[in-house]
Image: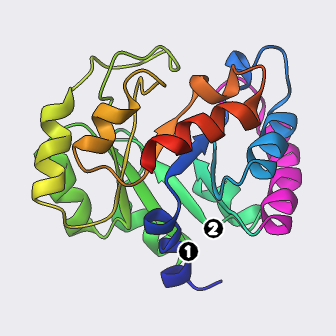
Amino acid sequence: MKKEDKMKFFETFNIYCITDEKHSNGRKNIDVVKEMLKSGIKIIQYREKYKSFLEKYKECIEIRKLTQKYNAILIINDHPDLALMVKADGIHLGQDDYPIKEVRKLVGDNLIIGISTHQPSQYIKAAKDGADYAGVGPLFETNTKDDVMPPVGLKYLRWVVKNKKIPFVAIGGIKKHNIKDVIKEGAKCICLVTEITQSKNIKKTIKELQDNFK
């Protein structure tokens, strides 16, 4: 699939999912991903902080097969080398990770590169450096990461909507009770982590979340 076709997923599909085995009620990442894909999710980001590189590799090989089966795209968090080895569709970087321009040299032009941003200057730099999309947040308080930063609030989201340069994904503490507020501000693609990974019925939860976009 060409990159321009992959990027259409960010405009076409409204829910972006991230793995989080630590907060998956004892379920494995692969089992959770299966439920996400069966529920119609088309964008999966693999994020795993607590496993060895070999464990991550083996897991991503299986998840890559699943995303191909369901015609979904796979984004790997943090590790450009892992993204290349498992033939993922993209890589997602943080502000303290490798520079976008250097990662682009490594992965080539056909892989999507996304980066987390927390303020306008970072978003502007991401676009200038060649990022394909930006994460915008955390909008609300979240505890899915050990090094989580304070929420930036909806003000930053409003700025991005008004000054959009590249596609973006709204992220951070988004739940059933506040997703409508995010949608009202103009977000078209929204990432939820524990609201989905911790759900006892992932399919039902995703359906309820998607209904908010209607």
Q: Residue at x 68, y 65 (%)?
A: 84
Residue position for label 2:
89
Q: How many marks?
A: 2
Q: Give the amino acid type for the residue marked by disc 2 in the picture.
A: Asp
Q: Give the amino acid type for the residue marked by disc 1 in the picture.
A: Lys
Residue position for label 1:
6
Q: Is residue 4 toward the left or the right of residue 29 in the image?
A: left
For residue 103, the mark is none
Q: Residue at x 64, y 41 (%)?
A: 207
165 within the magenta span? no
- In the image, residue 165 sits, relative to residue 55, either above or below, namely below
Q: Quadrant of the N terminus?
A: bottom right
The x and y percentages for residue 45 are 61, 47
Q: Is residue 123 toward the left or the right of residue 147 in the image?
A: left
Labelled pair 1, 2 in contact (Cβ < 8 Å): yes
Element under label 2?
loop
Residue most toward the front? 214
53 within the magenta span? yes
Element under label 1?
helix
Boundaries of the magenta span: 47-70
The x and y percentages for residue 208 are 59, 35
